[in-house]
Image (tube, rainbow, N blue to C red):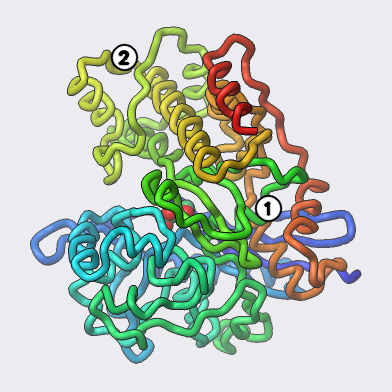
Amino acid sequence: TNSGSVAAVDLGATSGRVIVGHVDRDGVRTEPVARFPNGPVALHERGRDALHWDVVELYRQVVAGIERARAAHPDLASIGIDSWAVDYGLLREGRLLGLPSHYRDARHEQGVSRVQARVSAAELYERNGLQHLSFNTVFQLAADPDAHLADRVLLVPDLLGSWLTGVEAAERTNASTTGLLSATTREWDPALVAATGLPAELLPTLRDPGDRLGTLLPSLGGDVPVTLVGSHDTASAVVAVPATDPDVAYISSGTWSLVGMELDAPVLTDAARDANCTNEGGVDGRVRFLKNVSGLWLLSESVRSWERGGETIDLEALLAAAADVTAPVPVFDVGDHAFAAPGDVPARITAWCAARGRTAPASRAEFVRSILESLAAAYASTLQTIIDVTGKEVRAVHVVGGGSQNRLLCQLTADRTGLPVLAGPVEATALGNVLVQARSLGLAGLGGASLEALRHVVARTVDPVRYTPAPGSDARSHRTTVRSHA
Ligand code: LFR
């Protein structure tokens, strides 16, 4: 019944934030305390440009954010950390061996053949249940020329957690994205670890969301516990999907768009593998059955390239102009390898169109419209795949995260899926992070609460914006297909 405040550290691939969440009988309220940019840093090494994360700068920002949170709330009850998945720091005797590699670095692709020479793609899927992404940690480690120097590997949130507390652990939801975890036992799979060519001792003990990792080191102010949350950002976001109906899909919409459903057990069928669906580990042992679709990164990279000349882009104005575009725009394959690395996305869209004899967008507004139409089209076909593979009924799509504020994208998603879209909360990841801490501390009567009960707290707090499929949009055919699976 006691209320309380906790800090959520949420690191995304394009920005990080520290948010204080206040939890009481009425629900959960969030208060941003710090926000800072993040992104790949290209460093010339071994004769090429390698993409890294400036994880030391991230740590500095996290510590500053925690200090600000504690200054404003001296009674801060706990801290939880989440970030993007798969990337790691190599340590030797507790010392970081170099800046972590960024998942968009092309080097990882070399790891695929090395791993698959030891474990076939089919066996990999049977064991880890993961969609094939060449940046899965198992492939990154196999391609990492420095990995043999390390005695420990820590995923990014675990690395930051160890710097804050001195305690090393592998939080299980994020561990599930490595490709090294069994999809059925949710323990490290020795055969998968062996496929990297590295010793099993490299991996720390697995721990679960809700466990106390440790206490802030005395040099950092001491006293406050660091509580494990769904440290994979997507796992925390799914906790905060304000669904009150089980027959829904979600899109966790940020740098990436994670399109899928929550299931009780993994689906490891040939159909799931052929469709490249993933079974990632959720909080409370749930399965995040989903596919990675590209995301707002296409838009932010476009804006970045337009701003390269020194100009500042007004994104709101550009989105309004995109909503007014009436000329037909190309729908391109957002998953095409051409769009994977950082760079000039509009130029790549033009090249993609030219190679296929299509008319490229003619203005910035048309580029934005083309990107959002293409994302929405990918959401619709991915959702159909998820429905086909699971045989589940879907009556609505919850969109959470940054993309839930993009009205045009939400409307296009409703139109192309033929389903109502319920948009929000925008800060789902931080909310999921906060709620898992609050439950673990027993704040506001949440001790022992089910995920459904946590989602009710979110639903009580935020009112999602509803987007209805436009009558007469080409969604009608989608809707019939979707419904026929009911
Ligand atoms: C989203 C996300 C995705 C993961 C990608 C790379 O932020 O965590 O779930 O596939 O980033 O880590």
Q: Left or right: where does residue 384 sit relative to residue 197?
A: right
Q: Which mark is residue 433?
A: none
In the displayed structure, 241 sits above or below 396; it is below
Local crowd size for mark 2, using a 10 Å CA cut-off: few (<14), some (14–19), many (≥20): few
Residue at point 26%, 58% (across, down): 51
Q: Quadrant of the N terminus?
A: bottom right
Mark in front: 1 vs 2: 1
Residue at point 33%, 26% (across, down): 332
Q: Which residue is mark 2?
A: 362
Q: Identify residue type, mark 2.
A: Ala
In the displayed structure, 263 sits above or below 224; it is above
Q: Which mark is residue 240?
A: 1
Please name whichever residue, 12 or 125, is drawn nearer the observer in this view of the structure. 125
x and y percentages locating residue 62 in the rendered image: 52, 67
x and y percentages locating residue 303 in the rendered image: 38, 34
Element under disc 2: loop
x and y percentages locating residue 322 in the rendered image: 47, 19
Q: Left or right: where does residue 61 sit relative to residue 264?
A: left
Q: Quadrant of residue 100?
A: bottom left
